[in-house]
Amino acid sequence: MSEYSAEQVGRALARIPSGCAILTARHEGRRSGMLASWIQQAGFDPPAVSVAVKKGRPIEELMDAAGSFALNLIGDDPAPMFRHFGRGYGLDDDAFERLNVTDCDGGVALVDAMAILNCRVAGKYDAGDHWIYVGHVTDAKARDEGRPYVHLRKNGMNY
């Protein structure tokens, strides 16, 4: 196996665009959300998405127990959601305090989201320091106005 340049790998990975979403899940009265920046459509039939979750994040427990999650795509002004969800939340914290939300089939829907995708977990895969969840989309809602936020990293080797 040849050696690689971590700098070059980081620069190349940083050029892969992704969306940003608020990933939510709920189970037995507990609910949580987190900022997810590694999301991608993963299939057409059935419609599917993939989302990366750093190992040990509290939301992992809810996603595994519920077998579902919701992706709330954010608009082109992500600052309010970045500020709110950027610090992370434990399962005993109210991740949705002062936000306009409602429960949905997959988790929790942000009323002002660009789009909401309710998903049933189809698989969970080990990707080293992250889990990759694949979800089959069971329901969705999208606004017609506005543009979703698209993210490019400065360095693909860290957040």
Image (tube, helix red, strand yellow):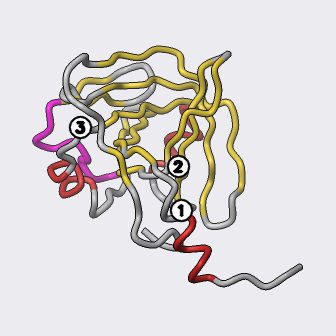
* 148 lies above or below 150: above
* Residue drawn at point x = 53 percent, y = 30 percent: 68
- Membership of 99 in magenta stretch: yes
Mark 3, Cα crowd under 10 Å, few <14 / some 14-19 / many 20+, is many
Amino acid type, callout 1: Gly
Q: Identify the mark at residue 60; answer none if there is no mark.
A: 2
- Between 76 and 12, the one nearer to me in the picture: 12
From the viewer's perspective, is 55 left or right of 117?
Answer: right
Q: Residue most toward the left?
A: 98
Residue corresponding to mark 3: 75
* Residue drawn at point x = 36 percent, y = 25 percent: 116
Instruction: Locate residue 101, reporting x and y percent.
Output: 21, 29
From the viewer's perspective, is 66 left or right of 95?
Answer: right
* Residue drawn at point x = 31 percent, y = 24 percent: 103
Give the CA separation, mark 1 to mark 3.
27 Å
From the viewer's perspective, is 54 left or right of 143?
Answer: right
Amino acid type, callout 2: Glu
